[in-house]
Image (tube, rainbow, N blue to C red):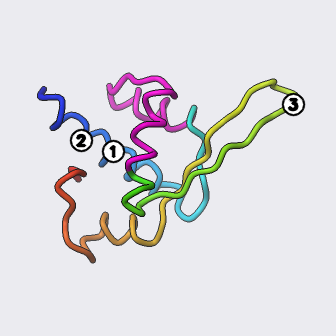
């Protein structure tokens, strides 16, 4: 699969995964596991780049959170109303996201 095409597909999958829990947020580990079930294998570090892109477009919001008990930091993401509109076809399609 061509790299640019693959990135667009992954971005679309991420939005669809976040839509499952809309309007609540989801942790990066959960998103990575959901992608893995769809046979897309990426790390949380790679996912962060996709989330940054989607956030710049206004489709998701993210925040960092940490757990003292677990000794780790997690990125949380949630679909925005604009992201929901993109998924529902209420705004013009985005060539950078394949749905």
**At 52% across and 62% down in the image, what residue appears?**
22
Q: Residue placed farthest to the right in the image? A: 69
In the drawing, does residue 72 fall left or right of residue 96? right
Q: Nearer the viewer, mark 3 or mark 2?
A: 3
Check the image and report above or below for 21 versus 67: below
Mark 1 burial class by Cα count in 10 Å: few <14, some 14-19, many 20+: many
Query: Are dots 2 and 1 in contact, CB under 8 Å?
Result: yes
Residue 45 colored magenta? yes
Q: Earlier in the sequence, mark 3 or mark 2?
A: 2
Residue corresponding to mark 3:
68
Residue corresponding to mark 2:
9
Check the image and report above or below for 60 versus 84: above
Q: Secondary structure at mark 3?
A: loop
Kindly identify which numbered label has been placed on residue 13: 1
**At 23% across and 43% down in the image, what residue appears?**
8
Image location of residue 14, percent across then percent down: 39, 45
Residue range (magenta): 30-53
Mark 3 burial class by Cα count in 10 Å: few <14, some 14-19, many 20+: few
Mark 2 burial class by Cα count in 10 Å: few <14, some 14-19, many 20+: some
Quadrant for the N terminus in the image: top left
Measure how far apart labels 2 and 1 are at the Cα level: 6 Å
**At 43% across and 48% down in the image, what residue appears?**
17
Measure how far apart labels 3 and 2 are at the Cα level: 35 Å
Q: Nearer the viewer, mark 1 or mark 3?
A: 3
Kindly identify which numbered label has been placed on residue 67: none
Q: 88 or 1, which lies in front?
A: 1
Secondary structure, magenta segment, majority class: helix
Q: Secondary structure at mark 1?
A: helix
Image location of residue 55, percent across then percent down: 45, 55
Q: Residue placed farthest to the bottom in the image? A: 90
């Amino acid at each position: 699969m061509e790299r640019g095409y693959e990135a667009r597909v992954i971005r679309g999958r991420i939005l669809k995964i976040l839509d499952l829990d809309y309007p609540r947020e989801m942790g990066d580990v959960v998103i990575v596991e959901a992608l893995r079930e769809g046979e897309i294998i990426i790390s949380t570090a790679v996912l962060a780049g996709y989330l940054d892109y989607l956030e710049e477009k206004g489709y998701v919001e993210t925040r960092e959170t940490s757990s003292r008990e677990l000794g780790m930091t997690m990125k949380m993401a949630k679909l925005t109303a604009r992201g929901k509109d993109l998924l529902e076809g209420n705004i013009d399609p985005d060539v950078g996201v394949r749905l």
